[in-house]
Amino acid sequence: MSSKDKNNTVKAVRQPPKMPGALPFVGHMIAFAKNPYTYMMELRARFGEIGEFRMFHQEMVLMTGPEANEVFFRAPDEQLDQNEAYKVMTPIFGKGVVFDAPLHIKNQQLKMLMPVLRDKPMRGYSQIIVNEVEDLIKDWGDSGEIDLLEFMKQLTIYTSSHCLLGTEFRYELNEEFAKIYHDLENGMHPIAFVFPNFPLPVLRRRDRARVRIEELVTEIIAKRASKKEKSEDAFQMLIDATYADGSKLSAHEITGLLVGTIFAGHHTTAGSAAWVLIELARRPEILQSVLQELDQIFGVDGEVTFQKLREIPMLERVIKEVLRLHPPLIFLIRKVNRDLHFKDYTIKAGKFVCASPRVSHRIPEIFPDPEKFDPDRYMEGRNEDKVPFSWIAFGGGRHKCSGNAFAMLQLKSIFSILLRRYEFDLVDDPETYQDDFEQMVVQPKEPCRIRYRRRKITLDKTGEAEARNVVGGSTGKVAETEQCPFFQVTVDFDLCQGHATCMTEAPEIFHVNDAGELEVLQENPPKKLLDKAKLAEKYCPTKAIKITSH
Ligand code: F3S
């Protein structure tokens, strides 16, 4: 087969190679479901960047590696459609919400959630998270044993419900919310992917839970309307939000968006937090470096503040390496609405296409010795993630997870407290701690036991002074050069999601309006603003800003 490209050159058009061994009716479903990760690794080993398999009647194309990822993440929504792939979420989020809404409505709904993740509210969340961690470990005593994953699930449901749903759900409705959430979660049953309304008891409980949570949300909206003082949480932001035509969100839509936000961040963060502690407990020398860094930054008993949490380089590299080896979402799916081209291949409309963070993160040409846990691979000089779209734990391009900064804030807050208070040991053989691929969001297999012992502090009190040196030493201070009195600010608007951290760091250069639209006030600002601009570049959660100075 052949086709002409935009230069009218005749190009070969190839279909992705197909995995052999498809069974009648089910296709490769059984082999894939047994262990999706090993199945996808096998497909890559056999075919490289692109290969096809079949789930029942549905043709699925797996694309891996940075170039394939870029095509996947940069394709417009009209061409690669998320909605079709995530129909299982409709009974949970609700009809007409996010994946069940037409594209122009979905985009507006997602935009309404953005203020929740902007710089200003994020500063308030750090204190809430720190308090929740302190509260949950206050009765731990000197030593004990916990199921790590259960602990992290409980902690992150408290932190995310407190930050996002507000105090009513966290304190007044805590127990009922836990039950509702549990029933909604169980609604992501494998059978619901194919038959979302199959008459199973677990799916009926899911539907009852969805009705009940909407009732609770409706009651809180009414209560809040009668109060003089306004809350400042995500819930309130959604109550106040409007569509482009001026209409407000219904209680049904607010419920769906709140549930969706909690779903997006809860399990993913809980699993990642558990893996951070497991990987550190397996490697005392790395744990020691992280501890030294934390003691320097926070001091013996120093306060954990948003400002200090922003830069913890060693811990950040550990988290990044955990997310490379154990990304909670091991594959992402889109439906092809318009033929998609990749190199010589054409993926026909009607097929599904998948990207896999887990497989892409194990390509030895990009991440040498890929199975090795090595946080130093992100250090200056090595920068193994420098190839665009090679490290994709949070997705990429305009579809990069908008909650990535919130997730990092949570993880850094949790470990800034836990590691300075307690020492941890794995209860079982370190090699028995493995990922559980039977879950949609991959987490460590249960049981996931860990022992803790109160940490003996032998530090002197010089930590905070040294910490200032550590943090200040790498805030992006740049020696000014004589040649040019100005520097260049470039923004990739395709990546910008309106987080507004740039405006906090350099208000002379960046302005974000209430609709989340960024305006660059000066593209060639004077050098006296360079330090501020570098901070904006550094802390932009989507890495949309580039600063160039001569
Ligand atoms: Fe956009 Fe990053 Fe600023 S997402 S608004 S450029 S902080």
Image (spheres, grey):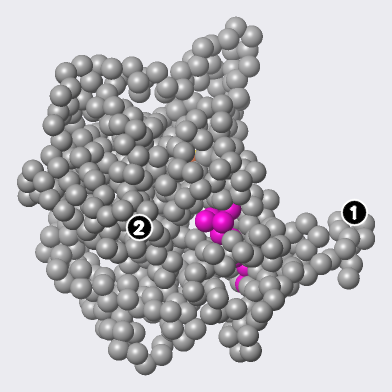
> How far across and how far down the image is residue 233, in percent?
26, 53
Question: Residue 33 bears which disc, if any?
Answer: none
Position of 111 with respect to 392 (left or right) is left
Q: For marks 2 and 1, give the one nearer the viewer.
A: 2
Asked whether residue 277 is in view, the answer is yes
In this orientation, which residue lies closer to the viewer: 512 or 188? 188
Quadrant in the rendering for residue 413: top left
Residue 466: percent from the left, percent from the top?
28, 17
Q: Which residue is mark 1?
A: 7
In the picture, measured across the screen, residue 233 lies left or right of residue 16, that is: left
Q: Which residues are magenta?
A: 351-360
Which residue is drawn at the image coordinates 23% and 74% (left, top)? 180
Badge 2 or badge 1: first in the primary sequence: 1
Are there few (<14), some (14-19), or many (20+) residues within 10 Å of tag 2?
Answer: few
Residue sitting at x 46%, y 46%: 498
Disc 1 residue type (three-letter): Asn
